[in-house]
Structures are given as C-alpha cells and as structure tokens.
Image (cartoon, helix red, strand yellow):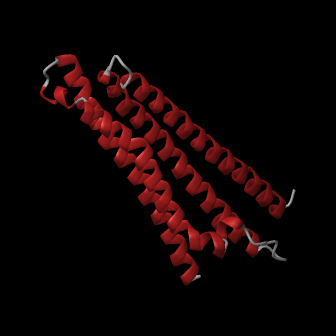
Amino acid sequence: MSAGETARKNYESARNELVQRIQLREQILLFFVGGVATIYSVALSAENKLEILLAIPYLSFGTAVILSQHNSVIGALGHFCAHEIGQFLKKLEPSEYAPLWESSASLHRYSSKALGLRTLAHIVLIVTPAALGLLMNWRYVQFSDMANGVIWWIGAMGTVLSLWFLMSAHWWRRKLYREVEWQDIAG
C-alpha cells in the first residue's frame, strides 16, 4: 500500500471516529437533559422533595467531564485530518491533496462562532440546572442537616468544576483554532 493510500485510510478512520464521538457527545447530552427533567419533575411534585435536586450537580460534573473529553478529542481529530494528513497529501509527488472539510474556509469562518455557541449551550444545559438545584436547597449550606450539608458542598464544588471543565475544553479548542490560523497565515 502506498503512503497516499495509507494517509487516506488514516483520514477515513480518524473522520469516522470524529463523527462517532460527535454522536456520542450528543447522546450523552440528551440523556443528561432527560435525567435532569425527570429529577426536577420528581422534586417539584406534590411531595416537594427538593433534596433530590442535590443529585444534579454530581450528574452535571460527570457529564461535563465526558463532554469535555469528547470535545477535546473531536478537535484533535479534526486538526489531524486537516493539518497533518492534509499537509502530508500535499507533499506527495504528484500531490494527492483534495480540499478537506476540516481545513475549508467555510468551516474556518464559522468555527469560532460554533465553538462559542456550543460552549454556551453546554453551560446552560449542564451548569444551570445544577446551580438551581443547589439554590433550591440553600438551607443546607450551613449544615442544618449534616449529611445534606456535606452533599450540598461537594455538589457546589462539582458544579464549579463542571464549569471549569467546559471552559477548559473551550479554551483548548480555541487555542487549536488560533494555531491553525497562524499556520495558515505563516504557511
């Protein structure tokens, strides 16, 4: 198998993984939103069991970690496809390069906006329900009930960490996009 064929197979494999990770990321988010809606329905029912909302920060933290990991790998796979495989194919004699979506001007113009919108949506869908659950159980902040007080404070830390993980993935992807912009200008 030639180097060009190997590169194309590697591109196809990376692209398939990228698409699969996008699908998994969206399924995780959908499952999370469904779980949060169910927990809020139970908590706000006639029995008014607001303590169950203290589970949401823990779910938010786990979801934020998983989504951040998927977002980071999706960015790395896109960069690999566009800039490592793409550059390799350009250098072959004769060149076997064809335009790639990952390095297209169309995607490049939209990528910053898409990144910002995705991060905002993740914060609204993941951090906001956790913060509201904590606010609705504010009475436990001073350990009026020791067990729920500990759960509240650990949940509060998890909520802050959820925001941190989501923002870290955002900043990493933004840095990756800026490196590409610089390479395009310099190259």
Locate residue 28: give its quadrant: top right
Q: Which residue corresponds to the image point at 50% horizontal and 34% vertical from the top-left?
A: 32
Locate residue 90: give its quadrant: bottom right
Of all residues, the one furthest to the bottom in this rendering is 186
Nearest the camera: 47 or 145?
A: 47
The spot of residue 175 in percent (x, y) is 45, 65
Q: Which residue corresponds to the image point at 64% horizontal and 67% vertical from the top-left?
A: 83
The spot of residue 115 in percent (x, y) is 50, 61
Q: Quadrant of the C terminus?
A: bottom right
The spot of residue 100 in percent (x, y) is 72, 68
Locate residue 86: give its quadrant: bottom right
* For residue 145, side relative to residue 125 (left or right): left
Q: Which residue corresponds to the image point at 32% horizontal and 27% vertical from the top-left?
A: 54
Nearest the camera: 3 or 124?
A: 124
Image: 138 above or below 18? above
Q: Quadrant of the N terminus?
A: bottom right
Image: 130 above or below 143? below
Of all residues, the one furthest to the right in this rendering is 1
Q: Which residue corresponds to the image point at 56% horizontal and 38% vertical from the top-left?
A: 30
The spot of residue 74 in percent (x, y) is 59, 52
* For residue 171, side relative to residue 134 (left or right): right
Image: 17 above or below 32? below
Image: 181 above or below 175? below
Q: How many marks?
A: 0
